[in-house]
Image (cartoon, helix red, strand yellow):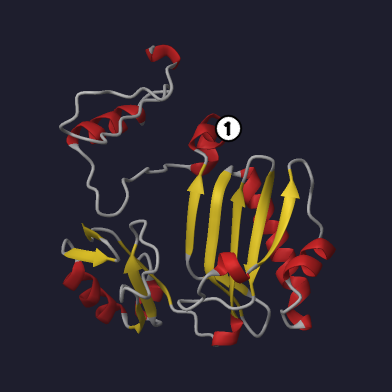
Amino acid sequence: EANPWLKEQKVVAKPDQLIKRRGKAGLIAVNKTFSEAKDWVMERMCKEQKVETVTGQLTHFLIEPMVAHKQEEEFYICLHSLRYYDEILFYHEGGVDVGDVDAKAERVQIPTGVEPTASMVTEKLLSKVPSGKQANLASFILSLYRFYKDLHFAYLEINPLVMLEDNTVVPLDMAAKLDETAGFLCAQRWGEVDWPPPFGRAAYPEEALIRDMDGKTGASLKLTILNDKGRVWTMVAGGGAS
């Protein structure tokens, strides 16, 4: 009842567990009714799944509206931060078969303190995009970069980024990393953020306890167990604990 669209349109279902290349792994159900998507999810819920070299249990899924589009309307974009500048990578083809974007993407480097302009983005990134889409796409990229900076992301990748015939921009899949050290600046804007372990590695009870404690205090409490049989503890940041 809270989400009537589920029964009014076709949907997409996929795991939401820090898994990349879900399409190639057969972990995306496309153009399904809600009933079909629900069955697809339940067939995989709490089951072991191997993704490339990692095996883990599927426990969290997303169901979202299906956005019908053409292959030529898919793009790829990635923003990431380095020591002295941010970099935006853009490729005029997106989707499951985008390939090695590091080798073929257009890119622009934005030094710290410099604001990119629409002309810079268009010239450096969008030369292979149809001219009728360039202005709207440049505007979206500038807004995305402001969003990226304001909320202290360290990495943000959208693939595919779809621009429909009416120039509406729709991000269909995204992977992102937040700069956790910016929590004192952005915690309220982030809202409740969970920091789950990587796919294929369940949290130890001790890690779960510390994570729960961390959520209830203004202090920063972190525990990552690298070797549960080890006898050496590494303190990467002392602070008050030292």
Residue displayed at 16% across by 61% down: 46
Residue at the far right in the pictured view? 119
Question: What percent of the width, then of the height, locates residue 92?
Answer: 64, 77
Quadrant where the C terminus sits is top left
Q: Nearer the viewer, residue 230 or 197?
A: 230
Q: Nearer the viewer, residue 232 or 225?
A: 232
Residue under numbered circle 1: 185
Residue displayed at 69% across by 45% down: 85
Taking 58 as reference, is 36 above or below it?
below
Query: Where, by quadrant of the figure, is residue 25 drawn?
Result: bottom left
Quadrant where the N terminus sits is bottom left
Residue displayed at 33% across by 45% down: 196
Q: Is residue 227 left or right of residue 166?
A: left
Secondary-structure class at tag 1:
helix
Query: Mark 1: which amino acid?
Result: Leu
Q: Is residue 34 left or right of residue 155?
A: left
Residue at the far front in the pictured view? 103
Taking 17 as reference, is 36 above or below it?
below
Q: How many numbered badges does the structure rendering display?
A: 1
Question: What percent of the width, then of the height, locates residue 95?
Answer: 50, 76
Residue displayed at 33% across by 24% down: 234
Query: Where, by quadrant of the figure, is residue 122 drawn?
Result: bottom right
Question: What percent of the width, then of the height, locates residue 149?
Answer: 65, 46
The 10 Å Cα crowd at callout 1, few under 14, some 14 to 19, many 20 or more, is: few
Taking 60 as reference, is 131 above or below it?
below
Q: Is residue 68 left or right of residue 110?
A: left
Question: What percent of the width, then of the height, locates residue 118?
Answer: 81, 63
